[in-house]
Image (cartoon, helix red, strand yellow):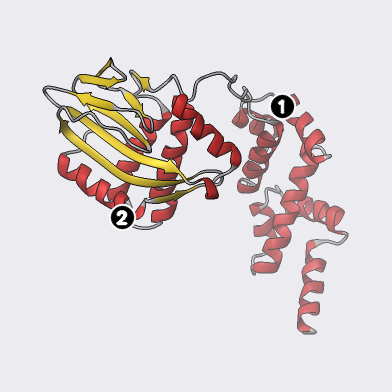
Amino acid sequence: MDFTQQELDNCNAVLNDYAVHVNGAELSFYVHYWGGETRLLTNHVHKHSFFEICYVTDGEGFYEEGGERWPLGKGTLFMSRPHIKHQIISDNGLYIVFVAFEVIPSDSSEEGVKRYLGLEKSRTFLIGQAERLPSVLIWNALLKQIPATRRFFDDSVLSLACALMASFESAFADQREPARALPAHPSSSTLVHRAKLYIRDNLSQELKLSSVADYLHVSPRHLSRLFGEELGQSYSSYVRKERIRHAVSLLTTTDWSIKRIAEETGFDTVHYFTTVFKSEMGEPPGQFLKRLKEHTELF
């Protein structure tokens, strides 16, 4: 974070005006204040009735709590928990950003409230070298997004503010539970969905199975098997149906020639296009279009 004091003040002024009630799907927060100092010197011993999370961008000092001291330096993320006396000590000043908040139980899930209440007794409240933690990356993105936002404030700034609040739980929670296992590779449904999108957007091309598999970094055999398992049809059958589906759309929404539509949907010749179209639709494209026009004229 490389903001001047004026830039920090401007960003935090916006947050203090608009990011007070921060609501997510399972967690809602009341933010007491957002702040930042480029040169914070030693403050008085004090306590809060809420959480205060601080991140040290630069400088050196100490965090004192319960008669013990922990060193503060560039990249330290730390949490002052409710009702615990503490003090930040620095002779030369710390470049620090901070946010103070509490969970709103009535607007949060039971699990969310339980987890945040658990942070009050967490043994993990100071993390060194936290520059790459999600909380720090989100915080930096949030501050940078504020002056860049011209529209969609709720979807950009407030969403980042909510993500930041929620990220603190995973940053400071005691690691008693195993992390949820994430799939090492894209799921079958994701691969098929990506293949379908690629096919839809490139129907004018040849679309060999090997080409699409190469695009997805899987083997042709694997992709072929996924189409059978996920869609209940072969890869070639799906591509053929998609070509005809798009051809029907072009026939009904444009005045293009049959030849142009055949080219746009990836058929080498009008004859082949007509053969496949009749096989899928029960009649050749010319007759389909004629019947459609006659039907339209009746209304």
259 to the left or right of 50: right
Q: Is residue 248 visible?
A: yes
Amino acid type, label 1: Pro
**Quadrant position of the N terminus in the picture:** top left
What residue do we see at 61% from left, 24% from top?
180
| Element type where label 1 sits in the image | helix
The C terminus - image quarter: bottom right
Q: Secondary structure at mark 2?
A: helix
Residue 224: image x %, image y %? 76, 31
Tally the marks. Answer: 2
The location of residue 269, given as percent across then percent down, is: 72, 50
The residue at which mark 1 appears reads as 220
Residue 247: quadrant of the picture? bottom right
Report the residue that reaches farthest toward the left: 92
Real-space CA distance between mark 1 and mark 2, rounded to the nearest whole angstrom: 55 Å
- Residue 279 appears left or right of 63: right
Where is residue 81 drawn, in percent x and y?
38, 30
Q: Amino acid at mark 2?
A: Asp
Q: Is residue 285 above or below residue 57?
A: below
Residue at (76% x, 32% y) in the render: 226
Q: In the image, 24: left or right of 207?
A: left
Q: Position of residue 207 (x, y in %)?
A: 67, 39
Q: Quadrant of residue 239?
A: top right
The residue to which callout 2 is attached is 17
Q: Earlier in the sequence, mark 1 or mark 2?
A: 2
The residue closer to the viewer here, 45 or 292, is 45
